[in-house]
Amino acid sequence: MFSLSLSVLPVFLLLVAGAVCQRWRFPMEGFWSGVDKLSYWVLFPALLFNKTSQIDFTNPMLPKYAFILLFALLVTALFVFLTTWLMKVAAPTASSMLQAGVRFNTFIVLALAGSVYGNDGLVLAALGASVLIPAVNVFLVVSMVLMHGPSSADGSSTVSLPRLVSGALIRNPLIVSILLGSGLNLLGLTPIILVSDVVGMLSQAALPLVLLAVGASVRLEAIRSVGMTFVMSSMARFIVFPLVIGVMCWWLDVRGLPALVAVLFGVVPTATSAYALARQLGGDADRMAAYITMQTLLSVMTLPLCIWLSQLYLG
């Protein structure tokens, strides 16, 4: 347990360092928002392209892996829908709870997979991301449009559901990089001379900078009296999602490193990009910011324990 905490600790120290730098406005005002854009549009897509281009798609375990992650997504979403119906919360709050429950911070997943399980873990985490990122984006856009109605970001015009879904996929650099890396891999065109080397160098810079940027995005002032809505959405994120993954791995006899990496998708906080989607599609953006901040802080305490339990029962 102690050695595991030491493996996880560097990830959170980088998050803390980013938060401190933002708090002190170091090195300058607006610097970390620029790093966030660089990470989202360049560094992280390079990392995902690099890792998905290395995946062995002939492995017979892969269909099971994808099924486990997607089934956990479905069960967690049903848990959130049932909870919001029983609590009778308004649609904007319900959609923010849904995002807090089913979204995951891909940056932290990959950082943890690499830190705790090495390059093999990082490749498996990229595989899981290639399954879940498109599925989560499509699912959330469709769900939020059905809950709020299809409107533009400023609420001035109506946008069709197919256009919103296609826009969410085409404009997402993470999804584009996953499709490119996986597609070229399946066609046997990787590695690519020079391109693979450049992408590999960029991917090495991705995780530390991304973690600093995630830490800088934490806003303590965003925390409000969110009460039971935060508790239930965090139960979905930190208990229901990983528990379903663990049970399905046991049932389908997926053990060892694939199971341990799969669990990581259920024990990290929700994605910081959830705030932008809440603003765009009519969710409760202020409450979403609070969920992101509080889950990130809570995960500092829960992650080592959850990873240790997964190693105990699935390792």
Image (spheres, rainbow, N blue to C red):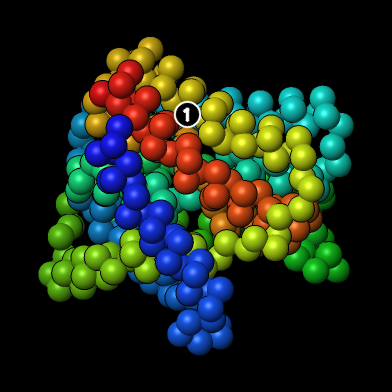
* Residue that badge 1 annotates: 242
Q: Is residue 97 left or right of residue 46?
A: right
Q: Is residue 119 left or right of residue 217?
A: left
> In the image shown, does 64 or 9 lie closer to the viewer?
9
Residue sitting at x 20%, y 46%: 118
In the picture, residue 236 is in which quadrant? top right
Determine whether 182 is above or below 262 in the image. Answer: below
Q: Residue furthest top?
A: 251
- Give the residue type that dot 1 points to: Pro
> In the image shown, does 315 or 227 lie closer to the viewer?
227
Residue 72 in percent (x, y) is at: 51, 28
In the picture, residue 312 is in which quadrant? top left
Residue 278 in percent (x, y) is at: 71, 56
In the picture, residue 282 is in which quadrant? bottom right
Q: Residue furthest front?
A: 2
Image quadrant holding the N terminus, namely top left
Q: Residue furthest bottom?
A: 28
Q: Evaluate whether residue 312 shows in this view.
A: yes
> In the image shown, does 24 or 248 lie closer to the viewer?
24
Residue sitting at x 33%, y 46%: 8
Determine whether 296 is above or below 212 in the image. Answer: above
Residue 225 in percent (x, y) is at: 79, 48
